[in-house]
Amino acid sequence: MSTALRRRPHPSPPPLPSPVDRIVARVRRAWRLSTLVRGLAVAPALLAASAVLLIASDLLMPMR
């Protein structure tokens, strides 16, 4: 009897995703990035628009 330990075989790698799954993953990644960029571009514009609106309302109806 041998007392040497047997090594476990390496687990097989996961199967490769199908071409459709790869395309869908790439499109989703691009969509997320574009949504983030659009949000970062819109946020300062909304801030500036609200500041202009507050200034205009103050000029039209000044507070006491």
Image (cartoon, rainbow, N blue to C red):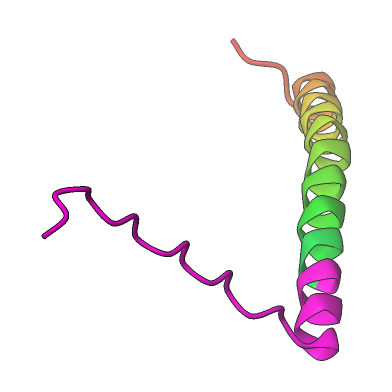
In the displayed image of the protein, which residue is found farthest to the front? 1
Q: Is residue 27 above or below residue 60?
A: below
User: Is 58 within the magenta?
Assistant: no
Q: Magenta region, mostly helix, strand or loop?
A: loop
Residue 15 at x, y = what percent? 63, 80
Q: Quadrant of the C terminus?
A: top right
Corner quadrant of residue 55:
top right
Residue at left offset 82%, top offset 89%:
20
x 53%, y 72%: residue: 12
Q: Is residue 22 magenta?
A: yes
Left or right: 6 in relation to 35: left
Residue 57 lies, in percent from the top left, at: 77, 29
The residue at 74%/26% (across/down) is 61
Is residue 29 rendered to the left or right of residue 5?
Answer: right
The N terminus lies in quadrant: bottom left
In front of the other: 60 or 6: 6
Tell me where residue 8 appears, x and y as whole percent.
Answer: 34, 60
Highlighted range, magenta: 1-27
From what the image shows, is residue 44 above or below residue 4?
Answer: above
* Residue 10: percent from left, percent from top: 47, 62
